[in-house]
Image (cartoon, rainbow, N blue to C red):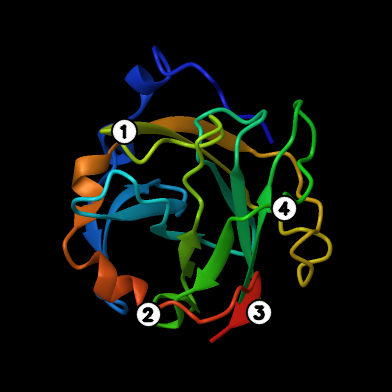
Amino acid sequence: MKFSTVLTGALASLAAAQTPAPYTDPKSGITFNTLQQSSGFFFGLALPANDTSNTDFIATIGGKGTGWSGVSLGGGMTNKLLIVAWPNAQAAVSSFRKVANYSPPPVAAGTFAQLPIANGTYVNATHWTYTFLCSKCIQSDGTTFKASDTAAGIGFAWNANAPAQKTDPAAGVRQHTAQGIAAFDLSKAKSDKFATWKAYAAPKVASAFSR
């Protein structure tokens, strides 16, 4: 897995379809500013409207097939907080990762946590979707974007091949087959409905779950 760390030039080559835009998930009703790729990969963010000290966000990530999808909350890969997810039958499996060099990233531990949102998490015949509250995920140590930012570079990557141990959130993932960085306008991710959507989250931390 390797994310480019340079926005200039990389962003210029992205197609219009790769520009994040507001999208409302039909099952959960949550509106995200969402990056959608022709491969089926997507990642969306939802933030509170007026809280620059907030450390939580709601995210949705998914794709087609059985491979993994991943994002870097700090743009690049190394020394940034990463999220990797994939489907396992009718379940979705996810974990935080962090690595200091360009090598398979191990699971990361910290105060951050993923709380799944069941009405936005599903696997069907065409794609899979994992929606969750990312609690205390906006860090002040440079590993993620900041709550006060108006824009954020979000790294993204995927591989169509599933991890060998699909049931294990700590499973090793194969090197990505595609990657890039997308510029997210965070103002388009903000909503005064955030508190309502946040309440959809499960009351306990989980990294593997099914619906």
Residue 87, image x, y percentages: 62, 69
Residue picked out by circle 4: 109
Residue type at mark 2: give it: Tyr
User: With 160 as the anchor, is 23 left or right in this view?
Assistant: left
Which is nearer the N-term, disc 1 or disc 4?
A: 4
Q: Estimate the spatial distance between the alpha carbons at disc 2 and disc 3, rounded to whole Å.
A: 23 Å
Q: Nearer the viewer, residue 131 or 143?
A: 143
Residue extending farthest to the bottom is 211
Residue extending farthest to the left is 192
Residue at 19 percent across and 58 percent down: it is: 191
Residue 42, image x, y percentages: 42, 53
- Which of the labelled discs sits on residue 200, or is there none? 2
Asked whether the viewer can see residue 196, the reply is yes
Neighbours of disc 3 within 10 Å: few (<14), some (14-19), many (20+): few
Kind of element beneath mark 4: loop
Residue at 53 percent across and 29 percent down: it is: 142
Neighbours of disc 1 within 10 Å: few (<14), some (14-19), many (20+): few
Residue type at mark 4: give it: Ala
Mark 4, mark 2: which one is toward the viewer?
4
Residue type at mark 1: give it: Asp
Residue at 59 percent across and 50 percent down: it is: 83
Residue picked out by circle 3: 89
Residue picked out by circle 1: 149
Which is nearer the N-term, disc 3 or disc 1?
A: 3
Q: Estimate the spatial distance between the alpha carbons at disc 1 and disc 4, rounded to whole Å.
A: 24 Å
Q: Quadrant of the N terminus?
A: top right
Q: Estimate the spatial distance between the alpha carbons at disc 4 and disc 2, rounded to whole Å.
A: 24 Å
User: With 62 as the anchor, is 195 left or right in this view?
Assistant: left
Kind of element beneath mark 2: loop
